[in-house]
Amino acid sequence: MKVKNRSHPVTRITVRAIDAAIFATAIRAKTRSSGNYVMPLKKKHVRILVICVVLCAGLTAGILFLRTCGSNEDISDGIPSPPVNTFTFFDIGPRTRLTEAVREELKSLLGKYGVETKTTIDLTLPGVTNFPEAFPRLQGLHQTFNYLPRQRIEHDTLRLTYRYARKKNVPFDRIRLVFSERHLTPLFISLYSKRDGADFIETIQRKYGSPETIGRSDSPERTLYWQKKDALLIISIVKNRIGFNEYNFGIYYLDNLTALADAEKKAREKAEREKEKTGELAF
């Protein structure tokens, strides 16, 4: 009897039980042939031995079956993977929390970084024509965060900026990851590459499918975008002064941005009410 996984503890028990039964049978046969006396096994003992072997074999088969069902090995071949329902950057997604472990992992991947808090929020992307019409929800959030024109409005944000990713063979010249300072979940990701964006576009198309396009698809300057339920990925391709392509990437987690906008609006309204009460008490 050949057992594939003899290292499994249950398998070892079963094999030992079977080997013991075979060994006992072989000894009895050899003893008979030599004419020596051997104490006969009682029928009850034989039944117990057989039952133990059968139970162990059944338990082994059951456990191995459950392990196979819980594993992706050997059962995923030929089965298409489920569609990707969001966008990620080095495994940073809408539900990622910025723990110290995540910071260290990003540092090992992208190099040294700068940290800023209470930053402004600009959701626009250079080179995107008709931005308000093309992305109305994103435009609405941008206006909500910048409700006072031409004034600096700071938000409850934490921004990590990486400018030396090329030293880690990551071909971006600037990477910005903006998180909610309260929840430590990502709000949006901004990426800029002077010359290597085309390779990323091919990779993104293989993963997420064909994009929607703003502008002519054969134009050197155009905008590509992919829309998911709660996330948006935009790539703007523009020409610089010397005629080379520059690539601006934006990944926006719309639900997280909306949650921050709503929380800040409630905080402003509460502050206004308290200011009015203070004025009434003062005068």
Image (spheres, rainbow, N blue to C red):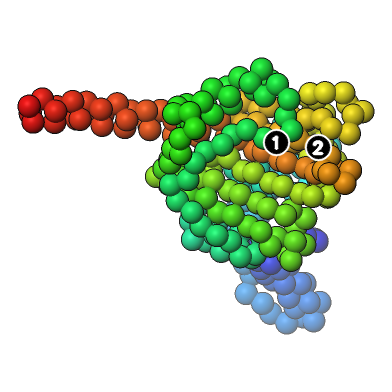
Q: Is residue 14 left or right of residue 279?
A: right
Q: Is label 2 in a helix, a strand or a loop?
A: strand
**Position in image of residue 130 (x %, y %):** 70, 21
Classify the position of the N terminus by image quarter. bottom right
The answer to the question of whether label 2 and label 1 lie on touching residues, with beta carbons closer than 8 A, is yes
Q: Is residue 82 visible?
A: no
Q: Residue at (52%, 38%) from the top-left corner? A: 121
The residue nearer to you, when weighing 282 against 140, is 282
Q: Answer left or right for 150 relative to 163.
A: left
Furthest-right residue in this view: 218
Front-most of residues 151 and 20: 151
Return the mark for residue 207: none
As measured in the structure, the alpha-carbon distance from the residue carrying label 2 to the one carrying label 1 is 8 Å
Q: Which residue is mark 1?
A: 126
* Mark 2 Cα shell of 10 Å, populated few (<14), some (14-19), many (≥20): many
The reply to whether residue 190 is in sight is: yes
Q: Dot 2 corresponds to which residue?
A: 238
Q: Quadrant of residue 93?
A: top right
The residue nearer to you, when weighing 97 against 53, is 97
Q: Position of residue 165 (x, y in %)?
A: 70, 60
Query: Residue at position x 87%, y 23% from top?
Result: 216
* Depicted 239 relative to depicted 138: above or below: below
Residue visible at 73% across and 41% down?
A: 248
Residue 20 location in percent, x, y? 67, 69
